[in-house]
Image (spheres, grey):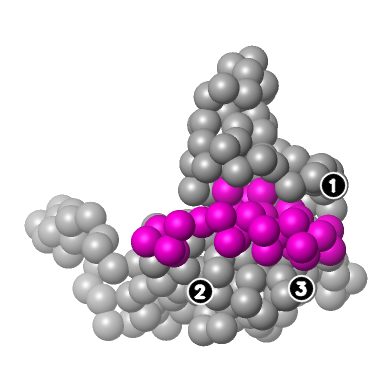
Amino acid sequence: MADAATLRQVAARSLPLVDDFPRRVDSGNPTKRAAPLFARLMDGDGSRERLNGSSWIAGILPRSLLAGSGERFRQRAMLDAASYPEIRRPGESLWSDLAALIQHSELVNAPRWMLDSEERKVEIAASRGTNDPQAIEHLAIDALANRRLPGPALPQEQFQAMTPKAQLVTIFRHCLSGQRAAATSLMNAIPAERRAMGPYPSFLAWAADNCR
């Protein structure tokens, strides 16, 4: 994210941390992840530009490796934005990032992580059976991450028993596989009073442009 030249620039106006002044480093927890410095260092395109422009990096890494790194920086930015949505770029969303990963990469763990799942959680979910809503959620995420095609649209009772995230991941899978009718049927099953709550608004905004 930064080499010595960038860090010197960042720290130019900061006094050094010494024994007599230990509190020059703030001990408080950060409350705004979108602070300009944090957002600047976490920006994927900016990170790649600093990598390509670093004389230190040029001396230790081959140019061919640097030239092929662009897409990985974009994917890293997607992971960062999933953890800190406030640094996500305007016009992008978790769902647009997930669609790009699923459709244009073979990554499995990244989509899992972006949806707060992982391989071990999937293993535990598989042992819990299909009567546990949280287990169903992780199994739905795993099916998406592994590009498994969805089956027919679920019965309404089964769909309503899902967690909100599992509902949206299930609809998302139908959207990406081209099963728009099934996706629309499930979206219509979401009660109107829930559409403005939790994870629903961002997904429905994405679906309005990408799942019609």
The answer to whether residue 5 shows anywhere in this view is: no
Instruction: Give the structural element (helix, strand or loop) at label 2.
Output: loop
In the picture as drawn, the residue positioned furthest to the left comes out as 20
Residue type indicated by callout 3: Gly
**SS label for mark 1:** loop
Check whether the beta carbons of the residues at disc 3 and disc 1 lie within 8 A of each other.
no
Span of residues in magenta: 167-195
**Position of residue 6 in the picture relative to residue 13 (left or right):** right
Q: Which mark is residue 128?
A: none
- Answer few, some or many: residues within 10 Å of disc 2's Cα (few below 14, many 20 plus, some between 14 and 19): many
Among the two numbered marks 2 and 3 on one chain, the one whose residue lies closer to the N terminus: 3
Q: Position of residue 30 (x, y in %)?
A: 26, 61
Question: Does the magenta stretch mainly form a helix, a strand or a loop?
Answer: helix
Q: Nearer the viewer, mark 1 or mark 2?
A: 1
Which residue has dot 1 on it?
149
Q: Quadrant of residue 11?
A: bottom left
User: Which is more toward the observer, 10 or 68?
Assistant: 68
* Label 3 element class: helix
Q: CA distance from mark 3 to mark 1?
A: 29 Å
The answer to whether residue 54 is magenta is no
Q: Position of residue 196 (x, y in %)?
A: 39, 66
The quarter of the rendered structure image containing the C terminus is bottom right
Residue depicted at 58% across the width and 48% down the height? 167
The residue under label 2 is 88
Local crowd size for mark 1, using a 10 Å CA cut-off: few (<14), some (14–19), many (≥20)? some
172 within the magenta span: yes
Question: In the rendered structure, which amino acid carries the disc numbered 1?
Answer: Leu
Question: On the rendered structure, is 195 left or right of 179?
Answer: left
Q: Rounded to the nearest whole Å, what is the CA distance between mark 1 and mark 2?
A: 29 Å
Asked which quadrant contains residue 57, the reply is: bottom right
Q: Height in image: 27 above or below 160?
A: below
Query: Residue 70 got which mark?
Result: 3
